[in-house]
Amino acid sequence: MRNSTLQAIFLERDIMLFMPTVKPLARFMALAVCSGAFTLMSALTVSAQWLPESTYPHSCTDIEIDTADTLRARCLQINGSLNRTSIQILGIENVNGQLRYGRDLSQRSNYPDSCRRISVVGATLMARCQRTNGSSTDTWILIRGIENQNGSLGYQYGF
């Protein structure tokens, strides 16, 4: 069970132990505030596995990594023409030699700092990344949440 989930369970238990001593209206308000806080905590700790699958490979060609974290492609527009476009890949980190999504999906990816031979095939990012012991390993990750927005690459979740 995730650490944030355990914290929420213990907080809820502590609140319920305190609630019988509080007047009904105050109890209702406290529960409403806590419910909102739990919802916000859940939204902030959303895992990257819940991000939508990238759809840009279905309508884009010449997909490549231009610089270490910039995805470039030619994407189909509604009028049928192709547009050259690019987007910075966000939120991916090197975690002891493995490409993983970090906690803040809107932040610059840090994998270029410790990975080499970075490439992309469709929506799969591949690299050779350094481990904490100094050795390197080949790794890959699915790039999530990027779509073709009428010829321009964009994030489906609003970054």
Image (cartoon, rainbow, N blue to C red):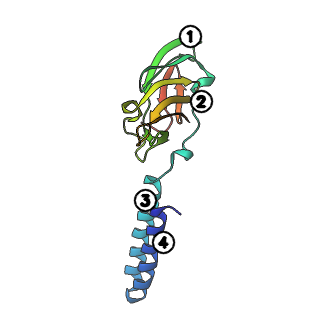
For the residues labelled 1 and 2, the Cα–Cα distance comes to: 18 Å
Image disc number at residue 9: 4
Instruction: Report the residue marked by disc 2.
Output: 55
Tell me the residue at 43%/84% (across/down). 17
Q: Are marks 3 and 2 in contact (CB under 8 Å)?
A: no
Ranked by sequence position, the earlier of labels 1 and 2 is 2
In the foreground, 98 or 89? 98
Dot 4 falls on a residue whose secondary structure is helix
Which dot, 1 or 2, sits closer to the camera?
2
Dot 2 falls on a residue whose secondary structure is loop
Ranked by sequence position, the earlier of labels 4 and 1 is 4
Neighbour tally class for label 4: few under 14, some 14-19, many 20 plus, Cα within 10 Å: few
Q: Are marks 3 and 4 in contact (CB under 8 Å)?
A: no
Instruction: Report the residue marked by disc 1.
Output: 81
Tell me the residue at 41%/42% (across/down). 133
Neighbour tally class for label 1: few under 14, some 14-19, many 20 plus, Cα within 10 Å: few
Ranked by sequence position, the earlier of labels 1 and 3 is 3
Neighbour tally class for label 3: few under 14, some 14-19, many 20 plus, Cα within 10 Å: some
Instruction: Give coordinates of residue 123: x percent, y percent.
Output: 57, 28
Kind of residue at disc 3: Met
Image disc number at residue 41: 3
Q: Is residue 59 left or right of residue 64?
A: right
Q: Looking at the image, which residue sits at the far bottom?
A: 21
Ranked by sequence position, the earlier of labels 3 and 4 is 4
For the residues labelled 1 and 3, the Cα–Cα distance comes to: 43 Å
Tell me the residue at 43%/88% (across/down). 20
In the foreground, 147 or 112? 112
Which dot, 1 or 3, sits closer to the camera?
3
Kind of residue at disc 1: Ser
Instruction: Give coordinates of residue 158: x percent, y percent.
Output: 44, 37
Tell me the residue at 38%/89% (across/down). 21
